[in-house]
Amino acid sequence: DHVRIANESVDDLKTVKPVILEKVTVKNIRKVTNFILGFVQNIPYETLQSRATSSGAGFNTPLRLLWENKGDCDSKVTLTVALLRALMPRIKIVLIFIDNHAIFGIDIPAEANETTVLFEGTTYLVADPTGPRLMNVGQLSDDTQNIVLSGLYSIEAFVDQ
């Protein structure tokens, strides 16, 4: 339940808000989002399936991901959206799930050649915090972009619970 876990993590992550605001201003949602993306993309990727290198649960909560400094795609998406919610509590965000991968969308106007999805009347700019490749909001790997453009995904709104 990624939305519930992200919501439960927001209060804990609000403590980093002043640190982030020293680097970027929340008045520019695109810059804040790209800053958070770069931070999370630099956290090492780990499938979290092996009991030798992780809990074997296949998922790290946002605080555990930060503590262990490793996470898979859905763990990184959950951390990213929780951080964004802690910084910008009113911004619309959706979690996007494709086969064996997770990304998210944020209600930011798209610029040229950026990938978007439409959900419940709102156009969301998509982003992938998985890394290790640094990609700004609106940019996806070719494989992920092709899947999104073909409509083979499910969406869950990130709403306060």
Image: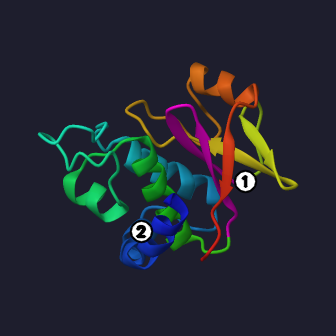
Q: Which mark is residue 22?
A: 2
Q: Main secondary structure of the magenta part?
A: strand
Quadrant location of the C terminus?
A: bottom right
- Is 57 left, or right, of 80 in this rendering? left
From which residue to which does the magenta span run? 91-106
Q: Quadrant of residue 93?
A: bottom right
Which amino acid does the dot numbered 1 rest on? Ile
| N-terminal label among 1 and 2 | 2
Residue at 37%, 76% in the rendered image: 12
Residue 95 lies within the magenta run? yes
Is residue 67 positioned above or below 130 on the image?
below
Give x and y (percent) for residue 72: 37, 41
Give x and y (percent) for residue 47: 31, 36
Tell me the SS state at disc 2. loop
- Is 90 left, or right, of 44 in this rendering? right
Is residue 71 positioned above or below 20 on the image?
above
Residue at 11%, 39% in the rendered image: 52
In depth, the one of 101 and 84 nearer the eye is 101
In depth, the one of 105 and 57 nearer the eye is 57
Give x and y (percent) for residue 97: 59, 42
Which amino acid does the dot numbered 2 rest on? Glu
| Residue for badge 1 | 108
Color encoding of the figure: rainbow
Residue at 74%, 40% in the rendered image: 116
